Structures are given as C-alpha cells and as structure tokens.
Image (cartoon, coloured by chain):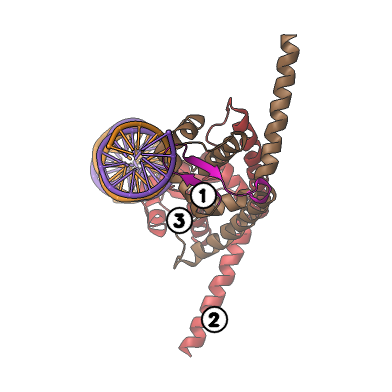
Chain colours: A red, B brown, C purple, D orange
Amino acid sequence: MKHDSRLSSVLHALLHMAEHDGPMTSEALSQCLNTNPVVVRRTMGLLRKAGLVKSDRGHAGGWRIAVDLSTVTLRQLHEALGEPAIFAVGNRNERPECLVEQSVNAALDSAFAEAEALLLTRFADITLASLAADFAQRYATMRARKDNHDA
Amino acid sequence: MKHDSRLSSVLHALLHMAEHDGPMTSEALSQCLNTNPVVVRRTMGLLRKAGLVKSDRGHAGGWRIAVDLSTVTLRQLHEALGEPAIFAVGNRNERPECLVEQSVNAALDSAFAEAEALLLTRFADITLASLAADFAQRYATMRARKDNHDA
DNA sequence: CCAATATGTAACAAATAAAGTTACATGAAA
DNA sequence: TTTCATGTAACTTTATTTGTTACATATTGG
C-alpha cells in the first residue's frame, strides 16, 4: 500500500521554516523536501486553514509559521491534515450482516482503537519546539564531530 | 490508500471453518467472504505454510483447520501473512541525509513503534477460540431476540 | 500602469499496491 | 478416466498518493 507521508513532510517543512529567517516560497520548500511546489502548496494550504501558517503572494511572499512552536503538537498537525487513516490494515466491511464478521470486526476494532489512542497521545506530547530542540542537538553533535575530525 | 484486509478475511474464513463440519472448499469460502476462490487460495496458502490449516485436493477436498483454536492468536495470523505494514502513514524517507528529517523520523518512529507494540500485544491476547466464543454469544443473543419477536 | 513573482486550484498523469480474474497445471477420489 | 479441488502464474481492475501542467489571482517593485 502506498502510504501517506504528509505528516512527515509538513514537519520537515515547518522545521526548515523555523530555522529560516523570513518567509519561504513553495519553490524553496519543495527543494528541501525533494518534491514539487504544487504539492507543497496543497499540503501547506491545509495548515493555513488550521491557522498554523500564513502565506503571502507576490514579491517577498511565501510561507510563515503563524504560531508559537511550543504550542503546536503533532496531533494538531495530524488533525490539520484531515485526520487521515492511520492504519494500512483493517476490516473488509464496516457494517457486515454476517455475525462471524461482526465478531471479527469487534475484536480488530478494539485493538486498533487502543493502538490509535496511544499513538494520538504520543502525538499530543510532541511539540514543534521539542523537535526543533532535538534538531539543534543533532546539529551541535554533528558540528562537534566535524570540528574534531578537521582538527 | 487501499488497505490490506487479509487479516480480517482469514479470521472470517477460519471462524466459518470452525463452525462447519468437514473441509470447506475455496469456492464455499469465497462465497462467505464475497470474493474470489483464487483470492481465498492465495491467502489461505500463507496460513498453510505456517501450519495453521491444511488443504486437500480432489473430491471431498478443501480447507481444514490444523491446530487447536485456543492456541492460535491474531498475532500468529499476522505473522503468517508476512507481517504486512500496519501503518498507512509514515516517513517520506527512511535514511535521510537531512538532519531536520532525521529529527522528524526519530520522533515519528518512536511513536509508531510504541503503537505497533501495543497492537501486537493485543493481537497476542486474542485467540481464535475467544473469537469463536464471542460469535457463539452473538448468535445466542440473536436467536433469543428472534424467538422473542416471533412469540 | 505593468511586469515579475508568488500563491490558489483544477485537471490530469504516474506510481504503487491490494484485490479480482483468467487460464491452466497438478493431484485425488469416485 | 472423468470430475473436482487446489496451486500458481500472469494479467486486469480499482483505489490512493504523489507528481505535473496549466492557468487564474493577488501583490510588489519599478
């Protein structure tokens, strides 16, 4: 199954925007993400509707983060993307007549619901600020290794 | 994304087989599942390789359960199907050069790993026998409602 | 004002993966 | 030896994400 990587994409884009002074164009972001500017606009447009970013047209236009990084969680981003289906496996039929299939669905649904609840809880715990901090640490570590190597 | 419903399918098939005396043909199972006999053989073939069912050709042939229902868990079935990807969302790139993307992946991977671990734990708790018992209860309830209605 | 730049969006194409289908080989039993 | 059933390869269909083209719309600098 071809899977949805938009959450990963918007996180990548938002962190680049956070590290960058001034707005970033769809073109610039598409290069960071190795994708197409239209795909960027399509996806970022969903974040704009959720009030998380703003866009400006024309000269010096582009995309800007519209909120404090510490207030945005992965869960909010997942919601902004329309809460796409998390699981690649699932029931054959959501409303089966067959009692056997009803038993199967009940068992699977409850297991999937628990896993989804845990995932969304974890998502709610992770803010953009914490990701930015993680990146800063990776960057510092990488620089330290590089300096050491150069010396 | 079009999702994988084989786990749901094989559960449905196995419970029908459990309720049925003697082997069931791919044709009969395909009617229970509203699908095609070849799809049934393809999927049940994976369970056969795992030793969970047996098949016989020719007259009076078909599929039989080869193990005790209380010893087979959903997790074993998931494994027999080749442990297909559970999530429909994920990273854009598994081994990114970009440090930003590495931070994003690390955060997402750990959340997904926890959710997957929980799901597999739940799967390991559910046996075919417990599903069969759930079905028996649904069936009894349905009969009681029907008898009451007919009276 | 107008040319350049950027987003907004519709429409369509490509890529991917599950499920369905056709065709036929193989083996078992009446 | 005919019939019935599985085994399997090859292909088609369907669904979904992502990529692409084309063009409208808005903003800014000259």
Is residue B109 at all visible to an observer of this figure? yes
Kindly indicate the quadrant of the structure image that contains residue A101.
top right
Question: Which class describes the residues within 10 Å of circle 2: few (<14), some (14-19), or many (20+)?
Answer: few
Q: What are the residue bounds of the magenta stretch?
A: B52-73
Can marks 2 and 3 be said to lie on one chain? no
Give residue B119's position: percent from left, percent from top: 64, 50
Q: Give the CA distance from mark 2 to mark 3.
A: 28 Å
Labels 1 and 3 touching (C-beta < 8 A):
no
Q: Residue at x 41, y 57 (%)?
A: A33
Instruction: Identify which amino acid the numbered label 1 is placed on.
Output: Leu
Query: Vertical placement of A52 versus B106: above or below?
Result: above
The residue under label 2 is A144
Total numbered labels: 3
Instruction: Identify which amino acid the numbered label 3 is placed on.
Output: Arg
The residue tagged with tag 3: helix, strand or loop? Answer: loop
The residue tagged with tag 1: helix, strand or loop? Answer: helix
The residue under label 3 is B92
In this orientation, which residue lies closer to the viewer: B95 or B127? Answer: B127
The residue under label 1 is B47
Task: Choose the circle earlier in sequence order: 1 or 3.
Answer: 1
Instruction: Identify which amino acid the numbered label 2 is placed on.
Output: Ala
